[in-house]
Amino acid sequence: MTVDAIGAGLRSDAPGTIQATEPTRFDDFARWLDGELRTLDVELRGAENTLREFAVGEGRSIHHVMMALEKARLSLMLAVQVRNKALEAYQEIMRMQV
Amino acid sequence: MIDELGGVTAAAVKLALDAATLRHQVIANNVANAETPGFAPARVSFEAHLAAARAFLDVSDDRALRSHLDDLTARLASPNAIRRQGEGPVELDAEMVELADNSIRYQALLEGISKQMAIVRTAIEEGRS
Amino acid sequence: MDYATAFAISAHGMQVEKLRLDVIALNLANANSVAGPEGDLYQPLRVVSHSRGVRSFALQIGDALQRISLPGGPAGSEVSSLDVEPRRVHEPSHPAADADGYVSYPGINPVSEMLHLIEATRAYEANVRALNAAKTMAMRAIEIGRAR
């Protein structure tokens, strides 16, 4: 789940048209979530590697390191918030009296 | 467990910070002895050894990098880390440039490891402040 | 590393200007010296510095983007002596006067030396300012993402 994904979602809607969206199937969502988490993992490792390279002297510029780390942190925070919301929704449903 | 959370990255950054601290002391000593007759400025010649650690960065085996870092830590503590450069008098502006370079590097390393730990903290705190 | 290259360039520039200063001071100190016993009169010196590979500057930028850094500061700086006519002053009573009663002094123009001194000082200050600017930029980069 990267910060870039938010922008991609916004762009796909053409202005002025209201479309009835297809209901997302459960396994599509699961697969999507899994893919996003893998992307997040790659991004986190990449940022950590950038810092390691900088420490050892191989690294690129300072702003590259700082930006990579900050982007990774924001992506992680977004993923955590999505997870928290999903958990909340699940708990709310479980509390419903049938 | 806390040691594992920091990981090899924290060890590498710590080593780089130690090197920068030592370099600062050497530069300060050079500046303090600017007027001492016969004093030759010294430099910390550690970067070559640190560069050798680069070979271990690509391999995903953290243990190899960690043992290499332990070896480098010992090297940094030895007197060989500091070398006299030539016999010349101390050039104050050259020392100032070294000082600026070293300060930037030190602060960048500090900020980098802070950010890295903030990432780990985000995961631990589950997004709840 | 980016900032390290900027520092190296400015440091090199400062070194060259300091050399210029030393040479000017030497010229001024010898302004009134006469020829020694071997007949060698002091010739004013000048620092000549040329930059490195100006033609391939575009290539240098390209290389820098690929992390091969080539500082573009002054490469070689040579101290060369100027070929100027000595200043001849009519002093028949001077021990070093020649047959016509003239004493030869080095052809140093103090006014132009002072001008070069001012230029060297300005250039040195400019290099220091460039270095400080590079340092400020690096400090700002460190502050990326830091909450105010």
Image (cartoon, coloured by chain):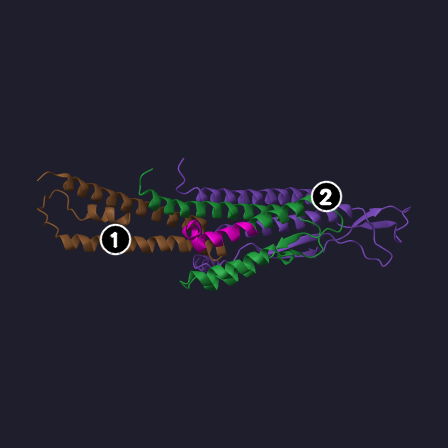
Chain colours: A brown, B green, C purple
Q: Residue visible at 33% across and 46% down?
A: B123
Out of B123 and C23, give the one closest to the viewer.
B123
- Checking the image for residue B36, the label placed there is none
Residue C114 location (% of width, % of height): 69, 42
In what quadrant of the picture does the C terminus of chain B appear? top left
Say which amino acid is labelled 2: Pro
Q: Is residue A60 visible?
A: no
Q: Quadrant of residue C40?
A: bottom right
Return the residue at label 1.
A36
- The residue positioned 66% from the left and 46% from the top of the image is B29
- Kindly identify the amino acid type of the residue bearing the numbered disc 1: Glu
**Residue range corresponding to the magenta coloring:** B1-19
Residue A41 in sight here = yes
Q: Is residue B15 in the magenta section?
A: yes
Disc 1, SS: helix
Task: Say which residue label 2 marks.
Answer: C110
